[in-house]
Amino acid sequence: MLLIIIIVLFLSVVILWLYEPRIFVYLSQRFLYRTDREAIFPDDIRRYFPQYKMVEEHIELIQSDLYELLTRQNRIPRLHQLDIRNQKISFDDGPGWRTCYIKAFHGWFPGNRDRCPETSRIFSAMNNVATVMFSIMEPGNKIPPHTGKFKGVLRYQLPLMVPTSGNCAITVGGITRPYKKGESLLFDDTIEHSVVNDSPQMRVILFLDIEKKTNFLVRAIDRFFMKLVVISPKFKRSLIKSFQ
């Protein structure tokens, strides 16, 4: 009887991993981390992300990769095309929210890494950066209020292209900040947030997930479950769809 129970539990875990491997990251981080409400647009970003000034200083190199990508903008998928679970915040109709992932859950997207050599080089040595992505909001787009699932990271954004007119801003926990080119923003993604680009121009940001500071054991647990995501069939399917 015990053997049967073990087998059933093992098969259940495998099936869950095949269906949605991120659930293990979500569950572990829910118990290991707390939402950091002090990290809503903090003045001292260095406290959370010590390397952020170096990122700002390399903005021109990062932009060079971006401009090359934008020559093939229509091949960059909308967020929900990579993951159907994002249909509440990314849509087929109307202006798009296009996303070019270079790295996610510490797993690289080889094709996009090659397309963005300067950006990849900058972040290859930053072990505390779990996700690297270009986030492209087309003119007139709005991302409705939503909350992230993963408590183990903070969201860093560096505006690379910002409209010169209209309202282009992000709201986190009721606090609104307009996007300004080259000015870093950081916040806890598990706090409700929304974005608006009520303008005739694109808004493009560099989008990073920065691991929260913790002890070695918690970090090891986190990295283990992220590795399960990276080796999953679902992640591999995302790699295929990441640049049409």
Image: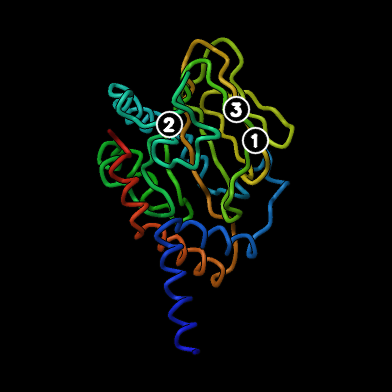
**Residue beneath the point at 46% across and 62% down:** 16
- Secondary structure at numbered mark 3: strand
The answer to whether the residues at label 1 and label 3 have Cβ atoms under 8 Å apart is yes
Q: Earlier in the sequence, mark 3 or mark 2?
A: 2
Indicate which label's residue lies in the foreground, 1 or 2: 1
Q: Position of residue 9 (x, y in %)?
A: 48, 76
Circle 3 sits on which residue?
195
Quick check: marks 3 and 2 in contact, CB under 8 Å? no
Residue 180 drawn above or below residue 46: above
Q: Nearer the viewer, residue 28 or 62?
A: 28
Amino acid type at mark 3: Val
The residue carrying mark 2 is 59
Along the viewing direction, whichever of 241 and 190 lies nearer the viewer: 241
Q: Which x, y percent locates residue 5?
A: 49, 82
What amino acid is labelled 2 in the image? Ile
In the figure, is residue 14 to the left or right of 74?
A: right
Label 1 is placed on what type of residue? His
Name the residue at 41% across, 68% down. 14
